[in-house]
């Protein structure tokens, strides 16, 4: 049977066990993908004793099936588009432009919300950057996050996930340098099926975890 996690914190603890070789290293930083990836990333950073930050991404959902990603955007104007899906689904240019405009507005809102000017952004250049989400479905969010991160010149990008389909490495391709996954089932319908509790992570949850991480006793204290 495939692994099923109690919640995102449980998933983060399991994932940290697969990343022990990065523990207590000054050249490592963990970045969670808001919102659901942040509780997972918090546990990873806490157990590895490395700094935690966020990298904001927004999925570009198909207009009539918003959970299906036709692409994604991320901080720094990074963009990933699944042209094959758009063509097969018959999505018009006007519909695509409307969705991307809406999601850019949401991206800007979350950047303003999560990046507290009192909290120094964690340095990524010349470090190993571990990108964490609560799971991978299409791979759009992780791909665009990695592309945005590449512009900040890390020495290595690691995609770290509690669960992903068995073909996750092929989906991510060369956008990441390493893939670490706790469980990669052949039969995969959704990320939520591998969690007993997959309740929504709120903006306030993310802000609270980032505040804890930046406190003297938090993961960032070792950064």
Image (cartoon, helix red, strand yellow):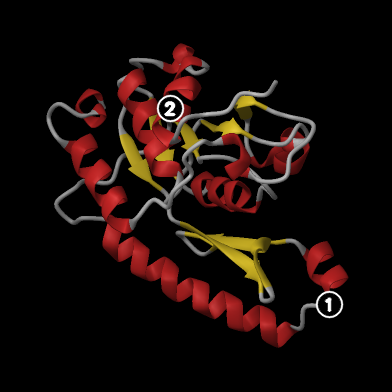
Under circle 2, the secondary element is helix
On residue 90, the disc is: 1
Q: In this view, does 128 lie above or below 109?
A: above
Q: Position of residue 47 (x, y in %)?
A: 34, 19
Mark 1 Cα shell of 10 Å, populated few (<14), some (14-19), many (≥20): few
Front residue (pair 35, 214): 35
Residue 52 in the image: above or below residue 47: below
User: Which of the two labelled residues, at mark 2 and mark 1, occupies the earlier sequence position?
Assistant: 2
The answer to which image quadrant residue 67 occupies is: bottom right
The tag on residue 159 is none
Q: Which residue is drawn at 58% across and 75% down?
A: 100
Residue at numbered disc 2: 10
Residue name at image x 34 percent, y 62 percent: 111
Q: Residue furthest top?
A: 21
Left or right: residue 132 versus residue 111 is right
Q: How many marks?
A: 2
Quarter of the rendering occupied by the C terminus = top left
Is residue 44 at all visible to an observer of this figure?
yes
Q: Report the residue at 35% width, 69% height from top.
A: 109
Residue 186 in the image: x percent, y percent?
79, 31
Question: Which quadrant does the N terminus fall into?
Answer: top right
Q: Do the residues under discs 2 and 1 have CB atoms within 8 angstroms? A: no
Instruction: Characterize the local packing of mark 2: few (<14), some (14-19) or many (20 or more) Cα atoms within 10 angstroms.
Output: some
Dividing the picture into quarters, in which one does residue 79 lie? bottom right
Q: Residue at x 42, y 49 (%)?
A: 55
Could you tell me how far apart the alpha carbons at marks 2 and 1 are, in whole angstroms? Answer: 40 Å
Q: Observer-nearest residue: 65 or 113?
A: 65
| SS type, badge 1 | loop
């Amino acid at each position: 049977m495939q692994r099923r996690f109690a919640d995102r914190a449980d998933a983060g603890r399991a994932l940290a066990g697969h990343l022990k070789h990065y523990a207590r290293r000054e050249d490592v930083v963990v970045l969670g993908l808001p919102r659901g990836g942040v509780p997972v990333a918090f546990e990873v950073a806490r157990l590895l004793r490395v700094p935690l930050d966020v990298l904001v991404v927004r999925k570009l959902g198909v207009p009539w099936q918003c959970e299906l990603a036709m692409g994604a955007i991320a901080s720094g104007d990074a963009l990933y588009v699944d042209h094959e899906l758009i063509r097969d689904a018959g999505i018009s240019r006007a519909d695509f432009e409307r969705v991307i405009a809406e999601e850019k507005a949401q991206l800007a809102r979350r950047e303003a919300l999560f990046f507290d000017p009192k909290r120094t952004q964690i340095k990524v250049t010349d470090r190993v950057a571990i990108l964490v989400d609560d799971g991978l479905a299409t791979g759009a969010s992780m791909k665009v996050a990695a592309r945005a991160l590449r512009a900040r010149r890390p020495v290595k990008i690691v995609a770290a996930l509690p669960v992903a389909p068995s073909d996750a490495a092929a989906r991510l391709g060369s956008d990441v340098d390493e893939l670490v996954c706790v469980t990669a089932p052949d039969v995969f319908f959704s990320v939520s099926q591998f969690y007993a509790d997959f309740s929504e992570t709120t903006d306030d949850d993310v802000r609270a975890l980032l505040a804890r991480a930046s406190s003297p006793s938090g993961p960032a204290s070792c950064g």
